[in-house]
Amino acid sequence: MKSEGWIDVQIRTVVDPAELLGLLADPVIQGGWEDQGLVHLYWPKPQWSLEARARLCRVLQEFDPNVSGEEDIRVEELPDQDWNRQWAESVRPIRIGRRIVIRPSWESVALEAQDIEIVLDPKQAFGTGHHATTRMLLEWLEDLIRGGESVLDVGTGSGILAMVALRLGARSALGVECDPVAVDCARDYARENGFGSALEVRCGRLQDVDRQGTLRPDVVLANLDRQTLVQLSDALARYVGHGARLLLSGILLEQEEEMIEMFSKVGALVVQRREQEGWVAVDLLMAESCEGCVDV
């Protein structure tokens, strides 16, 4: 497909490009990537308007209040070239932790004997492994998954966390996602990576998916924004109360104290924390199981 009629919307923001695609949930936008602090989105020229720009600003400012529409969003008409090829060339395989390899289908990687591999072509769903919030949880999963665990991935996006947990030896994984576009992407990825019935992706809110509160996961993953973590804090804490390990990410450094205090009120304490690029992830257990928890 030629670039005629397409523009490159360039945004200076900390929001992950795949997450931004999922938040916008607009099928006309074709791909996104990050380069030197700029997020690039390919937008059809006829669909780009003042209204589209205003909507983009509203979505961005909800998660990154530092974004200014005038200063931080720039639009360039693409030259006459194969923009789809240009986007594909910008997406490279990545290695995370000691064993995890994530690659697009058009790239091959020489794997070591201990490596696990996920093939993932970026679509309109959050979670390609490139963003710090995803990387931190993936690195923890390498140490946490020993084999046979059941995993609940809340706000699963692309399903990358659940898929890696299964590759590492988890018995089963349930991804919960309220965005139907992301659900379709995650199901496609699960099928393309051969997970079969081991990975189930359900569309809906957590409180609807587990209406009776009967799920008993061993590990709960929640890479979510602050507002959603606050809304789900009681439900997430209940899983911890039943013995689950809770890994949270998507927390900005300035939000960390608030999040830790909120979960400590229900008895969940921090086992460990990580920080990358201004983002924080925390690993929580119930206080009675938390020998050696860190004081933060």
Image (cartoon, rainbow, N blue to C red):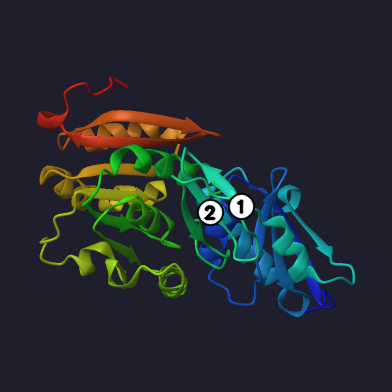
Disc 1 to disc 2, C-alpha distance: 6 Å
**Which residue is denoted by mark 2 in the rendering?**
102
Q: Position of residue 295 (x, y in %)?
A: 28, 19
Tell which of 64 and 276 is nearer to you.
Answer: 276
Disc 1 to disc 2: CB gap under 8 Å: yes
Residue 239, position as x, y percentages in the image: 16, 49
Q: Can residue 250 be seen in this view?
A: no
Q: Residue at x 60, y 61 (%)?
A: 104
Q: Is residue 252 above or below residue 239?
A: above
Q: Looking at the image, tell me whether mark 1 or mark 2 is earlier in sequence order.
A: 1
What residue is disc 1 on? 93
**Left or right, residue 146 beside residue 120:** left
- Asked where in the image residue 187 lies, by quadrant, the reply is bottom left
Classify mark 2: helix, strand or loop. strand
Amino acid type of the residue tagged 1 in the rendering: Pro
Of 285 and 112, which appears nearest the observer? 112
Q: In this view, does 142 lie to the left or right of 67?
A: left
Residue in the image at 71% along x and 56% along y: 90
